[in-house]
Amino acid sequence: MSQTASSPLSPPPAIELRGVSRRFADPGGRLVGVLPTSLSIPTGEIHGIIGFSGAGKSTLLRIVNLLERPDAGEVIVHGQDLTRLSAAGLRRARHRIGMIFQHFNLLHNQTVADNVALPMRIAGENPARIRERVKACLDFVGLAEKADVYPGRLSGGQKQRVAIARALAPEPHVLLADEPTSALDPRTTLDLLGVLADANRQFGVSILLVSHEMEVIRRLCHRVSVMEGGRIVEQLDIADGRIPEGSRLARWLSDFGAVGPAASPSPAGRPDAGTGHHFALEAAHA
Amino acid sequence: MPETTSLLDTLNELLPEILKATGETLLMMAICLSAAIVIGGALGLLVFLTGRGQSLERFRAFNLVANGVINVVRSFPFIILLVAISPFTRVIAGTSIGPLAASVPLSIAAIFYFARLIEQTLRDVPRGVIEAAEAMGASPLQIVRHVLLVEARSGLVLAVTVLAVSFLSYSAVAGVVGGGGIGDLAIRYGYYRFQTDVMLITIVLLVVLVQSIQFLGQWAARHVDKR
């Protein structure tokens, strides 16, 4: 196990990426991916990654659980360098790293309860413990009454809630979220951000979230890393919901005509109504 | 020339033969379908798992060899395969005539036919769902058990249905070389002896069998599909 650099006072980071890189050719033959990049996320933080398509943000996220194996660098999650683990060791480490996806990726031929139980069955938990966790997690996301329903009968927002319950069931140290609201409408997006914030508060799970939607990042994240061309070009503290003036992110927002309440919100004026605009960076390259 | 006898008389007269032939056909089907599902199913699964981007991609050499073998066996017209492997059949079954002997080439053809069918059916499982299981720390075997066999199950049922219908017709071809079964009956009486009524009876029998298999397969596939 590798030592992580931390003072005795602060707990080790939840995630620490040291000089990770991963390059590959996109369908157009252009080299994309992640240039040598480091990122440290303290335990309990909700960290956002924002950037345009092809900036490497999804690749960086997928490096954290080694769905994408970096060409170089160290990936330390909960004090363990995943790149040094055997196949079996990596599987064990993954049992405690939750992940949710843009398209939910639920099993359509299994009930909601069986979907939530899946990661614990894979981890070899005993049935009594699985039943207890499935119930607790479905209660948490507010879908206890849908336990015996198949996902095909749920709305998009409900499917993502099931996916969140599934990710939380094995009590992960870290939750990875890959564009989790990009397939959802604005109101459902807000509901889901509430669920993720609650999970962070109640269970202390650290969250790393990739999104191209500024509103999602601004509402949920404590800090944000801005990616461009495969590297992190800026890191901002946005715990108060403000995008610091003069930052590259603030410039982007003004360049793409999305300046408004999102760019300089008053802390009191953060309406949680479902009418919030989506200041999506994707507007720029749509 | 036979006198004008009614279809019913023929049926009555040939009933023991028809029953025996049906039994032989069912025996051949049972053997070759079992072999195909067990061996061909496993082969198809392995070919899928060793394919590009899948969890056992590092065994790509196996994938290339297995794909080649499947294609070669599937290139043989069945009747040629039947004749070509008859020495092998004699070793396995002790004889090259009768339903048991015919089951050998039938099984070989069915194994590779079904392997391809399974590999293609599994491709319909969305990549994202497999990836979600990988992110949970699932082993390749767990992915097979908890994801592939669950999400593809209605497609798998339909694959068995297609297999059964195809090999009902292949088993009739086996009749040509004395394999027995319904096809053998059709050839001996209906074709060689110009007994059109026997031909008719066997065709009706085959149509009923195919319809039943298809109906049952589609019902089961619908039943297990919750998507």
Image: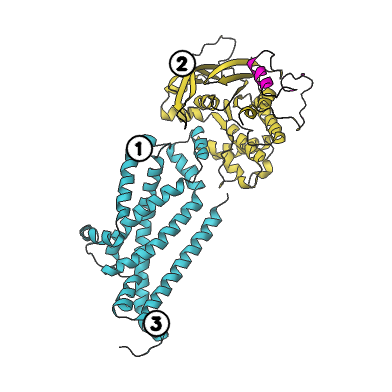
Chain colours: A yellow, B cyan
Residue A50 x %, y %: 60, 23
Residue A255 in magenta stretch: yes
Disc number at residue A2?
Answer: 2
Question: What is the chain letter for disc 1?
Answer: B
Relative side of A232 to B196, left or right: right
Tag 3 residue: B11
Front: mark 2 or 3: 3
Question: What is the chain letter for disc 3?
Answer: B
Q: CA distance from mark 3 to mark 1?
A: 55 Å
In what element is the residue under mark 2?
A: loop
In what element is the residue under mark 3?
A: helix
Q: Which residues are magenta?
A: A243-272
Circle 3/circle 1 CB separation < 8 Å = no
Q: CA distance from mark 2 to mark 1?
A: 33 Å
- Badge 1 local density, few (<14 within 10 Å), some, or many (20+)? some
Relative side of B52 to B90, left or right: right
Is the residue B19 above or below the residue A84 in the image? below
